[in-house]
Amino acid sequence: MQGLLTLGQFIIEKQSDFPYAKGELSRLLRDIGIAAKIVNREVNKAGLMDILGDVGTVNIQGENQKKLDVFANEQFISALTSGGECCIVASEENDDFVPIDAEVSKNAKYIVAIDPLDGSSNIDVNVAVGTIFSIYRRKSTDGKATLEDVLQNGTEQVAAGYVIYGSSTMLVYTTGKGVNGFTLDPSIGEFCLSHPNMTIPKDGTIYSLNEGNYVHFPDGVKKYLKYCQVEDQQTSRPYTSRYIGSMVADVHRNMIKGGIFIYPTTSGAPNGKLRLVYECNPMAFIIEQAGGRATDGYNRICEKEVSSLHQRSAIFIGSENMVLKAEEFMRQYSALTPDEKAEKKLEQMGVIGGID
C-alpha cells in the first residue's frame, strides 16, 4: 500500500513547476495550510465554547460579523504575516487591504486575497463552511506594494484554493497545473493527498441557487430554472435542486458530482452579490483548472476588470455544458450586456454589420 503523501511533501515535489519562486510560493501555501488547521480546530469545537454568534460588529459588506469570522481572519493574517512570503493581505472582513510591514516581509513578492470564513451564517446550525484564498505576484518593484498590486484580474492568479470544514476537512488548490485535494487526517494533524487531479464532470444533474429569490432573478435565470425542472430522459431532467448557502460547500459538491452553482444579479443586487476578488475569481480559477466553466452569465469571470477591493459580481460556475446552457438562456431572455448594447447601437448606426 502506498504511503500517505502530505500537503507539505506534495508542495515540495511540485516546487520545480515554479523555478522563479525559489520556494516562496511553496512556503506561502504551507502557511495557509497551518492557519486552516487552527481554524478547523475552532470550527469543530465551536459548540463547546463561547465562540458562536455575532461579535457585535459589522464588516465592510454591511453584514454582522460572527465570532468565528473574526477569529479566522486573525489567524490567516497572523500566519501570512509571520511567514514572510506575503506583502499584502486583502480580506473580505477588512475595509482596506492589510500591508505587512514586518522586516521578514520586506522583499515579499506575493499578495493574498482571502475570504476567511465563507458561509459563516451556517456556523450556528453546524453546516459546512469554508475558506477561499487567491494568490498573486505583486506588480510593483519599488517601495511598498499598493492597491494596484491587489486589483489584478483573475487571469493573473498564480494559485487559488479553498478549505471546506465539513464531515471531513479538505484543502483543494491549484497553481494553474490542475487541481488536487487534501483531506485532514486528525490522527496525525496533516492534510494528506486524497483527491489527485480533480476534474469536474462536463455535465451534471444538480443546480444550486437560492430559489427563494426567484421573483428577483433575471428572466434568463427564471427560464433556465424552468428548463432544469422539465422532464426529459435524454438530458436526465428534471435536475436535482441542492443549495447549502455556502459557496465553498455548493461548488465542492458540484466539483465531485457535476452541477452548476448560480448567484445571479437581482433587483436588489444589480451588480451581483458575491465578491469578485475574494470569492468569484479564486473559485473560477479552480473550476477552470478542473475542466469547468465560470462566467457572469455572459463573460468569463477571470477576465473581468477589477476596480475595487469589494467589487461584486454575478457568477455561473460548474460543469461546462450546464454553464453554457445557462448562458444561452441569459443571452436569449435577459437584458444585453454593456458590450452587446454598444455593439447593437453601432449596428443601428450602420457602423458595423448590415452593410454590403
Image: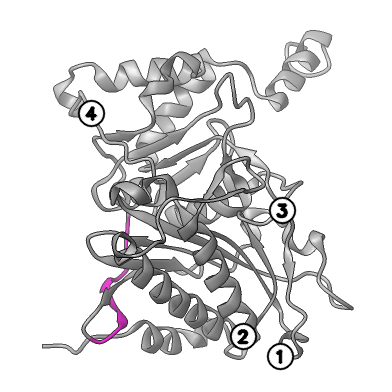
User: Quadrant location of residue 241?
Assistant: top left
Disc 2/disc 1 C-alpha distance (Å): 8 Å
Residue 191 makes an appearance in the image: yes
Circles 1, 3 touching at the beta carbon (< 8 Å): no
Asked if residue 311 lies left or right of residue 33, the reply is right
Q: Residues within 10 Å of mark 2 (few under 14, many from 20)?
A: some
* Label number found at residue 104: 1
Please state which of the two labelled residues, at mark 4 or mark 2, is closer to the viewer. 2
* Label number found at residue 25: none
**Residue kind at label 1, given as amino acid type:** Val
**Residue at image coords 44%, 42%:** 317
Point out residue 107 in the picture as x, y percentages from the top left corner.
Answer: 76, 86
Q: Which residue is mark 4?
A: 239
Span shown in magenta: 188-199
Circles 2, 3 touching at the beta carbon (< 8 Å): no
Disc 1/disc 4 C-alpha distance (Å): 52 Å
Mark closer to the chain start, 1 or 3: 3
**Residue at image coords 47%, 76%:** 35
Q: Quadrant of the C terminus?
A: top right
Mark 1 residue element: helix
Circles 2, 1 touching at the beta carbon (< 8 Å): yes
Disc 4/disc 2 C-alpha distance (Å): 47 Å
Q: Which residue is mark 3?
A: 95
